[in-house]
Image (cartoon, helix red, strand yellow):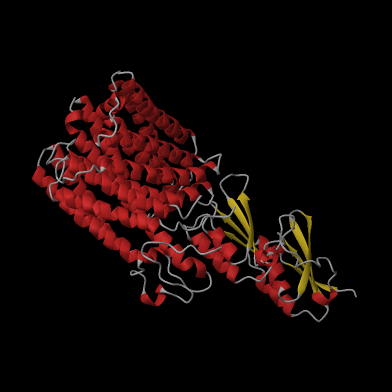
């Protein structure tokens, strides 16, 4: 079954410094059953993957040159079975999905980064990944993540000053 | 990478330490020890050890059990050992104080307390060194702040080693001529290793990390910080090893100490430059009370160094060595310790109480656990009182000294009450205090939840 895609090009809006989220959601609301959305953006719109994923859309993103991205959002029934192993326990060899939320906590007073990260993880679904930038290793956060059953991967970026942590919700619980 | 759990017994160390400080200030107010007695009189030594072991060392040990793991990103080797360690240290200190009281003729018993003090304190500090040493050893290669702590711990070992020799000689157990020489001449080395190596050098290492963390300043690992570390380590090595060698070879102990002083000044200057840079390069413009008061303590350290150099140049250092020791102990180390304690108690209490429910329900901020304007008055009184007492020592006015120490006592009690209120969550608005799923923290130990 071929999916008919409706084009939404938000590149002019983004280049003008605008916020295209409203227009995208309006276009999604106007889709007929079986129709998909072809989105053109100036970056990989990771947060949108999660938002539309929760509405039953799968996505296929590819870079189309000049830093621009084309993303095909297909309604679930029409989606190709690309990723069929979501329940696999997280181990270091697994590839984690792209983060659905990214935060930059580098300029926050301790323990505000920890507070924000834990608040965000509570609002996320199992299997989702959160990415956060910090200015040091979050020593007191890690036991709390473990207690809540989340898995994490972290390390310093090449600049040696920014610590990036990826947290996968509930992944440690699945592994256990 | 597993992160760091709460240190179970750190709050007991802090509580005991603050009580020891209050007791010492009470004794000074009562006119016990220097300047009412000679600086080397038994009652002065009683006072000095109550401050150095009871207050400063217990404070430092409690803090290190929590923060060495943070510095090296490893769990503490044992979270159980700190309690028996504390019991050994407190009973050992009690025996030591009784030993000094015995030495001064205040109490008379048929048996001596010094050997017991040597065994108990020796065992207690060996457990401290074992626990922290194992934690640090597992974390090699060490980051720079942790290496300061390693040198501090080595100095602690030297201090305790000398202290045990002194106690055994004074207790009449050891009679070997060499050990008598060490007891007669080794006091400056014991003091330098204790106040300079163990307490000050460790505080330097911890301050690099804590100040950067609380003021959002860049972590320093550059040439000046390495310089402060290597030159400071060299100064302590020359003072301790060189000093001991001088005593054992009947050379004059003043030479290694003079050489160490020169190196030490250089290390202090590098450290001072680093710390100024941390305060200037901070991203956080409005800093909390703990960082402001730590700044006052650091300025006190600088002023003490300047005063020391002035006295040395004037050839009066030996007459006023008591003032320098007083300033190092109270204006610098105690001021810095109280300032950091104010933050650490709030942070650890917050983490213990609200960590498990963060993000699940509304929780207070760390700053909701403290009442800074109230505490600031007590800190201001504390520092002014210390300056008054130090001036009284300089101009030899014992009655003014007692006034100063009385004000110090009042201020310390005030700060202690604030710390207790923080631990009891008394400053938190009642509606926010204990959300569902939380329970009030115990005053003296932290519940370490299984992860």
* Residue at x 60%, y 72% (from the top left corner): A123
* Residue at x 73%, y 72% (from the top left corner): A53
Q: Report which quarter residue B198 is drawn in.
A: top left
Q: How many discs appear?
A: 0
* Quarter of the image where the C terminus of chain B is located: bottom right
Task: State whether residue B92 is above or below residue A74.
Answer: above
Q: Nearer the viewer, residue B300 or A46?
A: B300
Q: Where is residue B316 in the image (x, y as percent from the top left)?
A: 17, 28
Does residue B87 appear in the picture of this structure? Answer: yes
* Residue at x 40%, y 41% (from the top left corner): B202
Q: Nearer the viewer, residue A167 or A55?
A: A167
- The reply, left or right, for residue B163 in relation to residue B402 is right
- The reply, left or right, for residue B131 in relation to residue B339 is right
As drawn, the residue found furthest toward the front would be B110
Task: State whether residue B376 is above or below residue B130.
Answer: below
Task: State whether residue A134 is above or below residue B46.
Answer: below
Q: Report which quarter residue B16 is drawn in.
A: bottom left
- The reply, left or right, for residue B365 in relation to residue B414 is right
Does residue B213 appear in the picture of this structure? Answer: no
Q: Position of residue A170 (x, y in %)?
A: 65, 67
Q: Position of residue B255 (x, y in %)?
A: 31, 21
Q: Which of B227 and A74 is in front in this view?
A: B227
- The reply, left or right, for residue A6 in relation to residue B385 is right
Task: State whether residue B137 is above or below residue B10.
Answer: above
Q: Where is residue B421 in the image (x, y as percent from the top left)?
A: 32, 66
């Amino acid at each position: 079954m071929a999916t008919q895609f409706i084009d939404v090009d938000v590149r002019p809006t983004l280049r003008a410094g605008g916020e295209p989220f409203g227009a995208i959601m309006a276009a999604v609301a106007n889709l007929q059953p079986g129709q998909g959305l072809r989105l053109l953006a100036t970056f990989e719109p990771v947060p949108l993957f999660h938002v539309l994923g929760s509405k039953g859309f799968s996505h296929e993103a590819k870079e189309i040159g000049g830093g621009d991205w084309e993303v095909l959002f297909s309604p679930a029934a029409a989606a190709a079975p690309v990723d069929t192993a979501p329940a696999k326990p997280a181990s270091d060899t697994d590839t984690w999905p792209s983060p659905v939320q990214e935060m930059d906590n580098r300029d926050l007073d301790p323990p505000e980064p920890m507070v924000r990260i834990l608040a965000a993880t509570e609002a996320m679904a199992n299997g989702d990944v959160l990415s956060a930038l910090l200015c040091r290793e979050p020593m007191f956060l890690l036991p709390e993540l473990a207690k809540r059953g989340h898995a994490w991967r972290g390390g310093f970026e090449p600049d040696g000053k920014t610590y990036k942590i990826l947290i996968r919700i509930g992944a440690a619980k699945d592994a256990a | 990478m597993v992160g760091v759990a709460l240190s179970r017994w750190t709050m007991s160390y802090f509580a005991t330490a603050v009580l020891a400080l209050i007791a010492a200030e009470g004794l000074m107010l009562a006119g016990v020890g220097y300047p009412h007695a000679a600086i080397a009189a038994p009652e002065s030594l009683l006072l000095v050890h109550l401050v150095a072991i009871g207050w400063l060392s217990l404070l430092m040990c409690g803090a290190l059990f929590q923060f060495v793991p943070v510095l090296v990103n490893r769990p503490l080797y044992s979270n159980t050992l700190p309690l028996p360690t504390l019991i050994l240290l407190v009973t050992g200190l009690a025996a030591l104080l009784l030993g000094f009281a015995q030495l001064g003729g205040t109490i008379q018993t048929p048996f001596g307390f010094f050997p017991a003090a040597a065994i108990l304190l020796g065992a207690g500090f060996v457990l401290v060194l074992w626990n922290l040493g194992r934690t640090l050893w597992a974390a090699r290669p060490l980051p720079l702040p942790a290496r300061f702590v390693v040198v501090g711990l080595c100095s602690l070992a030297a201090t305790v080693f000398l202290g045990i020799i002194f106690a055994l000689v004074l207790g009449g157990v050891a009679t070997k001529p060499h050990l008598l020489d060490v007891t007669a001449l080794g006091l400056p080395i014991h003091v330098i290793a204790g106040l300079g190596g163990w307490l000050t050098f460790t505080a330097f290492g911890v301050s690099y990390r804590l100040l950067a963390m609380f003021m959002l300043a860049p972590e320093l690992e550059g040439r000046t910080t390495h310089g402060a570390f290597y030159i400071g380590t060299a100064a302590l090595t020359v003072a301790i090893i060189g000093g001991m060698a001088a005593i054992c070879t009947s050379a004059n102990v003043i030479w290694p100490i003079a050489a160490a002083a020169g190196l030490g000044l250089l290390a202090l200057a590098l450290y001072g430059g680093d710390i100024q840079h941390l305060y200037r390069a901070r991203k956080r413009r409005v800093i909390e009370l703990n960082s402001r008061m730590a700044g006052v303590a650091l300025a006190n350290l600088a002023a003490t160094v300047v005063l020391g150099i002035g006295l040395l140049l004037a050839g009066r250092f030996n007459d006023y060595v008591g003032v320098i020791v007083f300033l190092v102990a109270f204006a610098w180390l105690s001021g810095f310790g109280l300032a950091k304690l104010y933050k650490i108690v709030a942070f650890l209490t917050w983490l213990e109480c609200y960590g498990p429910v963060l993000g699940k329900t509304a929780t207070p901020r760390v700053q909701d656990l403290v009442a800074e304007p109230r505490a600031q008055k007590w800190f201001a009184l504390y520092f002014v009182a210390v300056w008054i007492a130090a001036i009284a020592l300089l101009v030899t006015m014992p009655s003014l000294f007692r006034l100063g120490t009385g004000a110090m006592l009042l201020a310390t009690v005030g700060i202690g009450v604030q710390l207790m209120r923080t631990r009891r969550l008394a400053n938190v608005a009642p509606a926010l205090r204990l959300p569902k799923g939380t329970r009030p923290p115990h005053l003296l130990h932290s519940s370490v939840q299984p992860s």
